[in-house]
Amino acid sequence: MYYIGIDIGGMSIKGAVVTEKGEILKKSSTATLPDRHYSEIISDIAKLAYSLISELGLSVNEVSGVGIGIPGTIDGENGFIVYSNNINFEHVPIVAEFKKHINLPVKIGNDANCAALGEVKFGSGKGVREAVFVTLGTGVGSGIVTDGKLLVGKGGAGAEAGHSVIRTGGERCTCGRKGCWEAYASASALIRQTARAIERDPSGMMAKLSREEGKISGRTAFKAARAGDAAGKRVVASYIKFVGEGLVNLANIFRPEMLIIGGGISNEGDYLIERLQKFVDKFSYGGRRNPNVTVKKAELLNDAGVLGAAALVME
Amino acid sequence: MYYIGIDIGGMSIKGAVVTEKGEILKKSSTATLPDRHYSEIISDIAKLAYSLISELGLSVNEVSGVGIGIPGTIDGENGFIVYSNNINFEHVPIVAEFKKHINLPVKIGNDANCAALGEVKFGSGKGVREAVFVTLGTGVGSGIVTDGKLLVGKGGAGAEAGHSVIRTGGERCTCGRKGCWEAYASASALIRQTARAIERDPSGMMAKLSREEGKISGRTAFKAARAGDAAGKRVVASYIKFVGEGLVNLANIFRPEMLIIGGGISNEGDYLIERLQKFVDKFSYGGRRNPNVTVKKAELLNDAGVLGAAALVME
């Protein structure tokens, strides 16, 4: 049998036909145009699904179900989008609306949670039953898999590990609290930390790199550090510590087999992952007496979303 | 059918015969004498179980199984105590050893996890499928129930929420990290916070109360605050904030239906619980758009351990 995975983003909606082994047979996308009424957007998603099926020469009967990943708070149990900031959705009965177009089982989930499920079923975490997936991007997203299933919490509002305070009273977070992990470990936070270091040393290597690039990015400090710049190394070491603190918290709470790192910052690869692994090994509760927790880079990149969405309907 | 719950502590070992509704038909205890070889201690546990059964006039065939709660890292899957600080157990095959005495299904778990399961099955969280149980005692313990089952993590080493950093670089914790929740929210931490306030104001109400009691306790600041003392109120407000920060972190990660508060500090009752509820409502992610998380005092007190241990074998 085949499964359809849909990943709704602010700009585009991706769709794919997937086997139960996680092979993508065909994928395609369509523009989100998020200012429209939800019924139009959902109608477009149905068209995308139909075109994928027909281009593969399949009939609807050969498809077991459709999974849809959506940014925001998703009430999967009742088939509602509670709230999605990116696409102005609030209390949208997406499953019922979608079934007007295609009569197949439909499941929905938060997009970061879907990406987590995708990575655990088919990517870095293949074969693992307990893992936490963390994306270091504009924010810090998280998806939690326990016993092979997504932990979503009441009304789908859980798995917001980015909004755990790691420094009470610290940097203001977008969520209203002070000192959230996201305010220290996101790419935006790293850019802020880099900007402060540049202010302190306007003639240093990071200042030079940022002028060349035309902006300070999440890569600036890492580039400088790799080139041996002492100030760059300090920014990276401090950033690694902030990311590490949150990872160790998750290691202690879940003691998963694996912590999977995605998002833009994960492109720093081994340089990042090895340092995070060292931090996690050093500070996790119980030290060597307890099972170690492996830190790994996410593998599936942009396909994690559609694969994880498809995996929602594989159970 | 009947179930036996055993709760091993540093001083005494409690046992109870329990129905599947959580009624305790009979309970008893025996001294732990923790310096003995584990085979002697386990033999005593078996004797305790036999005497409970026979005093009720039951036969072993009428008992479905024995659940045992043990402090430390417990590998329930393989039936081993990995490590228990309180009773000098390390890599003890407790299930195999116990079965030499009684031929019944045996399950083991960490004592805090068992207490959590007890509270969720038969206490404050009755009927709830998702809850986090937090004990504010000498340390900060936690037990996590998702989908009605305990989350124990790889090798039983998870559910250590007390060892989440809430102030990176902060107070030294017993676990080696700096700034753990436990170092701010345990009764020991509150005593430290109270002692500092007394040092600043040696003629104040808290100083007076501690002289009367002969020591500074976890109750000193609460007593002063209830009596209207400004310095006492400040200590309590700051302590509530520290406890609250960790609770909100757990609310955001799990979005459980309930956060259950146990341990010595929970005896402060509504005064404590109402303030924690306010904090959780105010700072949980998504505010009123997301489902609220109820903060509740633990109900079962000393029976939570044996009831939860018995619940281990009820599935």
Image (cartoon, coloured by chain):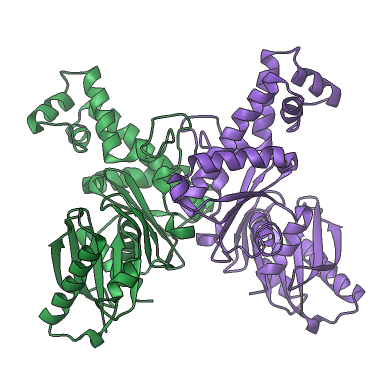
Chain colours: A green, B purple
Q: Report the front residue among A60 and A43.
A: A43
Q: Is residue B315 left or right of residue A253?
A: right
Residue B216 position, x and y percent, is 76, 26
| Image point (73%, 39%), residue name | B268
Residue B139 position, x and y percent, is 65, 41
Query: Residue A40: which quarter of the image?
Result: bottom left
Q: Is residue B24 left or right of residue A11?
A: right
| Image point (49%, 56%), residue name | A291
Q: Is residue B285 visible?
A: no
Q: Is residue B280 left or right of residue B118?
A: left
| Image point (46%, 59%), residue name | A155
Q: Is residue B304 above or below residue A55?
A: above
Tag count: 0
Rendered-image quadrant of the N terminus of chain A: bottom left
| Image point (51%, 33%), residue name | B178
Q: Report the front residue among B111 and A273.
A: B111
Rendered-image quadrant of the C terminus of chain A: bottom left
Query: Residue B26: which quarter of the image?
Result: bottom right
Residue B210 position, x and y percent, is 79, 23
Q: Is residue B40 left or right of residue A32?
A: right
Q: Is residue A93 visible?
A: yes
Query: Residue A70: which quarter of the image?
Result: bottom left
Residue B2 position, x and y percent, is 78, 76
Q: Is residue B223 above or below residue A240?
A: above
